[in-house]
Image (tube, rainbow, N blue to C red):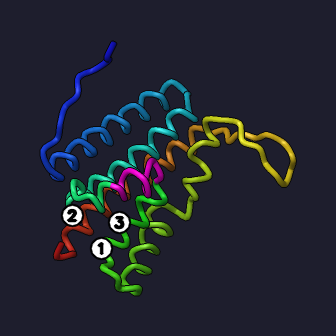
Amino acid sequence: MYLGNRKFLKDSIEVAHEYLKTAMQDEKSAVILESRELYNQAAYFYVQAMEKQIKAKIAQIVDVTNAYYKEMIKKTIGHSLDKSIEILVQIYGKGNAMVEDRLREQLITKVLEDIKFSALHNKTRYPDFDENKKKYAVIEMAKIDCVELAKMLKALKQYLTDLERYTDL
């Protein structure tokens, strides 16, 4: 038994469009879940929307059907927003440490407000054992957290648009 229909994408641009479409669906899901006071679930989808926005940008500027980038997307990035940011910085920075540092600062500090998304991602969904406290813990999100994540998503989308305008990639 199979569920769903497999749609094959012919090139990196189609991959980018699919990431953008899914990012918009994730954002819509987050808004609906937030309105139903399912804040942890909404937070998860806000973060997923951010990750897919960045993956879409990566697919727009490099050929993700190329073996090197295909492996990078699949193995290195996986579902990590933090790793997606790092790969985007490396691609735009082109090996220039000063440019990469500036991009990293803008994205991580200014746009995403120094949040460690790798720590947030699963801890809003599953109990996690804290070695220091020797106890399990979960992160409970509230409406204000979702409002902040929605603002970050909006700022990220604007930043990625501006980045395209001010670079020659």
Quadrant into which the N terminus falls? top left
Using the image, tell me which numbered label, if any, was put on residue 67.
none
Q: What residue does disc 2 label?
A: 61
Drawn side of residue 146 relative to residue 18, left or right = right
- Verify CB contact (< 8 Å) between mark 2 and mark 1: yes
Locate residue 138, reporting x and y percent.
Answer: 71, 39
**3 or 2: tag closer to the N-terminus:** 2
**Figure disc tally:** 3
- Verify CB contact (< 8 Å) between mark 1 and mark 3: yes
Q: What residue does disc 3 label?
A: 88
- Label 3 and label 2: CA atoms lie apart by 9 Å
Quadrant into which the C terminus falls? bottom left
Q: What is the magenta segment's predominant secondary structure? A: helix
Locate residue 100, reporting x and y percent.
Answer: 39, 79
Name above or below for residue 81 compared with residue 6: below
Q: What residue does disc 1 label?
A: 92
Seen at 22% across and 50% down, the residue is: 16
Q: Residue type at mark 2?
A: Ile
> What span is in magenta?
71-80
- Label 2 and label 1: CA atoms lie apart by 9 Å
Q: Assess disc 2: are there few (<14), some (14-19) or many (≥20) residues with their C-alpha within 10 Å of its C-alpha.
A: some
Drawn side of residue 125 relative to residue 127, left or right = left
Drawn side of residue 53 relative to residue 65, left or right = right
Q: Residue furthest top?
A: 1
